[in-house]
Image: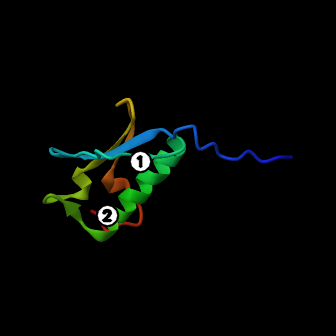
Amino acid sequence: MRQRTPRSDIPMPMYYFHLRDTDAITDVDGTDLADIDAAREHADTVARELTFKTTGILGEEWSKWTMVVYDGAGLELFSFGMSTVRYGNGK
């Protein structure tokens, strides 16, 4: 059985990972990922890295922040509270 090789001429979708509480930290660059499952995995990884290194951002604890993920068309795909992130130091 032949394996399919990735085609470099098919662009991967863009995903944007914003942080929001009363303020917003906007991901203006985005990340190319294969699909929404990869976006969920990436969001979890970013959130764990952030909460591992700090207890909050902009003077607010992580429990007040939400990660919101959008596709390239600006459609909100999913979100989760940063307080739900496992393996971090956030409270």
Mark 1: which secondary structure?
strand
Residue lying at the far front in this picture: please name it.
Answer: 9
| Amino acid on which disc 1 is placed | Thr
* Residue topped by disc 1: 31
The residue under the point 63% across, 42% down is 7
Crowd tier of the residue under label 1, counting other residues whose Cα lies within 10 Å: few below 14, some 14–19, many 20 or above? some
The residue under the point 58% across, 39% down is 9
Report the number of discs: 2
The residue under the point 38% across, 62% down is 48
- Residue 91 horizontal/vertical position (percent): 27, 62
Q: Residue 51: which disc?
A: 2
Q: Quadrant of residue 60?
A: bottom left
| Amino acid on which disc 2 is placed | Thr
Residue 2, above or below 52: above
- Residue 12 horizontal/vertical position (percent): 51, 40
Mark 2: which secondary structure?
helix
Residue lying at the far right in this picture: please name it.
Answer: 1
Looking at this view, is 83 or 42 the one in front? 42
Residue 14, above or below 73: below
Q: Quadrant of residue 70?
A: top left
Residue 13, above or below 45: above
